[in-house]
Amino acid sequence: MHKTMKKMPRPFDWNQARAFLATAEEGSLSAAARLLGQRQPTLSRQVASLEQALDVVLFERVGRSLVLTRSGLELLEHFRSMGAAAEQVSLRASGQSEAIKGRVTISTTNVLATYHLPPILREIKKQAPEIEVDIIATNELSDLMRREADIAIRNAKPEEPDLVASLVCNTTGHFYATRAYLEAVGSPQTVDQLSNAEFIGFERPERLLLMMESLGISLTRDNVKFSSHSDTVYLALIKAGLGIGLLSKEIAKLTPDLMQVCLELNPIPIPIWLVAHRELHTSRRIRFVYDLIAEALPKFESTP
């Protein structure tokens, strides 16, 4: 009997990968074709050839847009890494990597700027010492259309058509409080017990009350004694033992005294989007910083 030979996938070229990446980021073949300066039928054939080579369906059509399938999402980060690697190879081969210089402005939240950006900036300095970085640490959305920033790190996908957005990672939010606070209020661990606890509000107490109601937890303004628009102040209030607050698991790990509250609650999804103006595709310094952040941020999610 002949042994069944495992079918090997056919090789694909970089043009197919670029077509897939552009379509995934732009959301349609027409927008991707404009971005790459190609005709739409040509781009469509490249995507189809990649699907045939990999033996997977990468997109499904929803209205006028193309949405990544589960297989497409799983492969997207691998292709992004290939893209970043290809660009670095090109730069180094031409002896231009040291020539990347100039100012890049990054807008992100206070917490991300405080805890996540410094090691990324250290890597930027190592690889491109002539890059200058300005950080706008704010919880307000900087207007990339008005060029208030070159790159923004957000928790929501922007709607503006002239912005390029990449979902770089997903993390989860949980409720935390200090050990001393939980012992003082009897360590509430069920949804019913939480109704008697005190919570830290973010921005406005009403925002927290609406979110808790959606989770099946009934609270009133009496449950929210302290609120802040600053996420670093918000974190400080939780660490001071003034109540229970919602934090990403990565930030909570940085404070060993914090304990997760009510384990029966489902994690709250927190997407992290990397956003830039379309100049991303023509500015080498912005592209360099953008790709490095896109590569580094998911590593925080997996850090034990």
Image (spheres, rainbow, N blue to C red):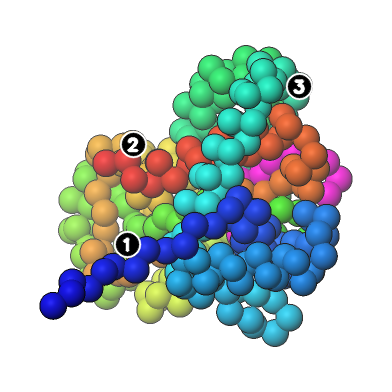
Examine the structure image and report whether residue 18 is included in the region drawn in magenta. Answer: no
Q: Which residue is mark 1?
A: 197
Which is nearer the N-term, disc 3 or disc 1? 3
Q: Quadrant of the N terminus?
A: bottom left
- Given residues 245 and 265, the one toward you in this image is 265
List the residue tagged with mark 3: 102
Does residue 205 appear in the picture of this structure?
yes
Q: Secondary structure at mark 2?
A: loop
Residue kind at label 3, given as amino acid type: Gly
Please give the residue where the numbered disc 2 appears in the rendered image. Answer: 254
Tell me where residue 25 sits by quadrant. bottom right
Residue closest to the far front: 1
Residue farthest to the right, as pictured: 146
Q: CA distance from mark 1 to mark 2?
A: 24 Å
Q: CA distance from mark 3 to mark 1?
A: 50 Å
Quick check: 78 left or right of 160? left
Q: Position of residue 236 (x, y in %)?
A: 43, 38
